[in-house]
């Protein structure tokens, strides 16, 4: 059965055009056009992430709430915020993870995948980074204003430029090769050039940079190092991740998930050391899980301990699962369905599985992803799921 999601997205874009916000009449139009439960959820998500002007009249609120099936979402505190450095520009939409990202580069990957001229990243409260869209072009954005502490215009990728920059690497050696790679990797990912470091064999990767590892012995698309409580994490990408634009951002997002888990593990490991416990870190973490009556919250608490313990003892199934889910999400966001199929298939083919609670958190995220997809993309999703013999995708 077909869905209406692509049409709803078009209505959303049209509503935002012009004044950069969604007013009551436009919200009502969207809510009325949403028929199924999934479509209503998609529209609720739009109103939560977009510059939606909450109706002041109680009757209007009630009407919208009813049309959306019971609840009217709050809009993101970032929506409608002024963009520093560009007069009159505001944030009209929050893209990607509305809860924000723990690193600038992760937010950049999500913003780049959106394929929008006005895609950007902003640093908000709590030093989190958000992928957003401005209402007018804001290429010169810089500085801070209000809730926006820092900003970078990301924009969209042009395939011909990607291909031409890639060709320019051919035949170059030494520093010229490094420079050509830097240019290309910056363009592919949207990460500023001065935040990219190109490594030859023997060069040390750097924390805070996207490291491009050109050592012929470096085989994976990307990696973060194994856990070492005395060292910070770093992210490396290999040339294999740059076969297509969507793979570059999906792989960056994948590694940024690991990097976040590394930082989370460092923090928890610090508490473990302070506790002077004689347990292993895994047992200590398991004993210190905060319980909750809400099964969703309880599962997420188990998941956090599962991820950290795995990082420390090398049973990495949990972090790997979430990194693959995130890569699939970014690939679907990019609209490159070949890449989306590849990344979702990696969730299907995971050999080692984490705890059941951890799996159910991932399944919840995957269901949400599926519900947000328009027809063609959803067919690809279902296709991959239908081939699952077991594991996380089975029974989605
Ligand atoms: Zn991984």
Image: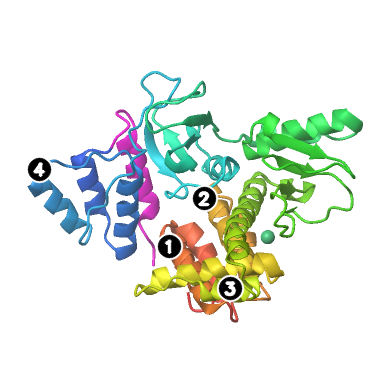
Give the residue drawn at x 34%, y 37%. Answer: 79
Mark 2 vs 3, N-terminal side: 3
Is the residue under label 3 in contact with that under label 4 (CB below 8 Å)?
no
Asked which secondary structure carries label 1, the reply is helix
322 in relation to 221, above or below: below
- Alpha carbon of mark 1 to alpha carbon of mark 2: how far? 13 Å
Mark 1 vs 4, N-terminal side: 4
Q: In front: mark 1 or mark 2?
A: 1
Judging by the rendered image, the residue that carries numbered circle 2 is 333
Judging by the rendered image, the residue that carries numbered circle 1 is 368
Judging by the rendered image, the residue that carries numbered circle 3 is 284
Asked which secondary structure carries label 2, the reply is helix
Mark 4 vs 3, N-terminal side: 4
Give the residue drawn at x 71%, y 36%. Answer: 196
Mark 4 vs 2, N-terminal side: 4
Drawn side of residue 81 relative to residue 173, left or right = left
Q: Quadrant of residue 27?
A: top left
């Amino acid at each position: 059965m077909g869905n209406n999601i692509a049409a709803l997205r078009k209505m959303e874009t049209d509503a935002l055009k012009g004044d950069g916000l969604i007013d009551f009449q436009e919200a009502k139009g969207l809510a009325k056009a949403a028929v199924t439960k999934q479509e209503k959820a998609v529209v609720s998500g739009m109103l939560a992430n977009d510059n939606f002007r909450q109706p002041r009249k109680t009757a209007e609120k009630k009407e919208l709430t009813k049309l959306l099936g019971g609840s009217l979402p709050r809009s993101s505190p970032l929506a409608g915020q002024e963009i520093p450095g560009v007069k009159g520009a505001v944030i009209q939409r929050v893209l990607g993870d509305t809860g924000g990202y723990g690193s600038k580069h992760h937010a950049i990957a999500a913003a780049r995948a959106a394929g929008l001229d006005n895609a950007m990243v902003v640093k908000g409260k709590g030093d989190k980074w958000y992928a957003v869209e401005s209402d007018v072009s804001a290429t010169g954005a810089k500085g801070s204003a209000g809730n926006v502490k820092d900003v970078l215009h990301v924009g969209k990728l042009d395939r011909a430029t990607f291909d031409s920059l890639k060709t320019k690497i051919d035949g170059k050696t030494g520093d010229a090769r490094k420079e050509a790679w830097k240019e290309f990797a910056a363009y592919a990912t949207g990460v500023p050039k001065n935040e990219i470091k190109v490594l030859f064999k023997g060069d040390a990767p750097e924390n805070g940079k996207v490291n491009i590892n050109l050592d012929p012995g470096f085989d994976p698309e990307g990696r973060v190092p194994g856990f070492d409580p005395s060292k910070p994490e770093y992210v490396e990408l290999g040339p294999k991740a740059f076969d297509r634009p969507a793979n570059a951002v999906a792989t960056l997002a994948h590694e940024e998930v690991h990097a976040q888990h590394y930082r989370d593990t460092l923090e928890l490991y610090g508490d473990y050391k302070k506790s002077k416990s004689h347990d292993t870190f895994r047992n200590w973490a398991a004993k210190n899980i905060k319980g909750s009556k809400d099964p969703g919250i309880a599962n997420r608490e188990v998941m956090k301990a599962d991820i950290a313990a795995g990082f420390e003892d090398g049973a990495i199934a949990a972090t790997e699962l979430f990194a693959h889910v995130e890569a699939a999400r970014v690939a679907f966001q990019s609209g490159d369905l070949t890449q989306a199929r590849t990344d979702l298939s990696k969730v299907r083919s995971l050999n080692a599985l984490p705890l059941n609670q951890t799996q159910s958190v991932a399944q919840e995220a995957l269901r949400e992803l599926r519900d947000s997809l328009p027809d063609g993309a959803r067919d690809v999703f279902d296709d991959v799921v239908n081939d699952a013999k077991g594991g996380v995708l089975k029974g989605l």
